[in-house]
Amino acid sequence: MIKVRKRTKVLRYSLNLERIASDIVAYLLNIESPKESYSFGNKSTALSFNQKLNLLIDNETITKDEKKKLEAFLNIRNQFMHNIDANTFTEAFHNINGLENRMRKFYPENFDENLEDSLEKCVDNLFRDGIRILVSDKGGRKRKMEVEVQAKLYKEYFNKQTESIRTNFKKFKEALNEFNEDNIDKENLMEVLKLMEMEISFSPVLDLKIFD
């Protein structure tokens, strides 16, 4: 039962990490429904976990050093999923060249006389660090978030500016209608203002300098 618990634990960790990786890459690629996509769904066309990590490296969302921790976890997962004789963390680590030594460098505080418990703590650490690495705000993910924030702020500014201009136009037209000087061609001015109003209404981007 304990052996099954450990295998199940690693599988649960793995599924969570892969889902996070899929969601982040899909977000970077503007894919709204990753579960239904060819690359991130549950079909045979879906990208592997390692391929998703490579995309995140190319995008600078994670670094090569950070990928090493995620790959270490991936190697442990593969032992439990594909090696029927890997029933304990000690057995799984034994089949991965140099992994125990790397864990001793990453997490020296985890190790005591009980090697099996020590290695399980390392797996827990790898899972937590994996989440932290994947959701970190840097590289491509940070740039995309900054662009979205800037776009939202610009849209809010543009909407307020457009509304302000419309209000001023309304006041100007009211003033023109009440003005009685015969030497002013009010009809022509009104047509110009109407045209400018239409340009504001239908143009998604307006160069406000034309009103300077």
Image: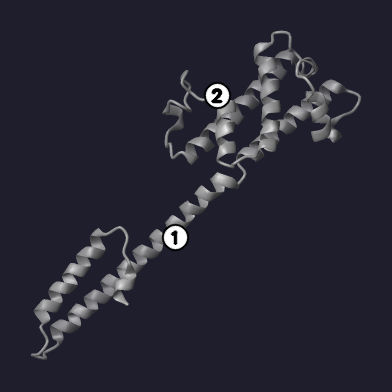
- Seen in the image, is 3 located left or right of residue 136? right
SS class, disc 2 = loop
Residue 39 drawn above or below residue 90: below
Q: Position of residue 153 (x, y in %)?
A: 44, 60
Q: How is the image coloured?
A: one colour
Q: Hey, what amino acid is under mark 1?
A: Leu
Q: Position of residue 61 (x, y in %)?
A: 59, 42
Q: Which circle marks residue 153 in the picture?
A: 1
Question: Which of the pair 74/2 is nearer the observer?
Answer: 74
Q: Position of residue 127 (x, y in %)?
A: 69, 31
Query: Comparing marks 2 and 1, which lies closer to the viewer?
Result: 2
Q: Which circle marks residue 22 in the picture?
A: none
Report which quarter residue 141 is drawn in: top right
Residue 97 drawn above or below residue 202: above
Are there few (<14), some (14-19), or many (20+) residues within 10 Å of tag 1?
few
Q: Which residue is mark 2?
A: 48
Q: Quadrant of the C terminus?
A: bottom left
Instruction: Identify the residue at image location x=46%, y=38%.
Output: 29
Q: Residue furthest top?
A: 84
Instruction: Identify the residue at image location x=21%, y=68%.
Output: 197
Instruction: Identify the residue at image location x=69%, y=35%.
Output: 128
Q: First in sequence, mark 2 or 1: give its number.
A: 2
- Seen in the image, is 36 located left or right of residue 208? right
- Seen in the image, is 200 located left or right of residue 95? left
Instruction: Identify the residue at image location x=73%, y=8%.
Output: 85
Report which quarter residue 130 is drawn in: top right
Question: Which of the pair 8/195 is nearer the observer?
Answer: 195
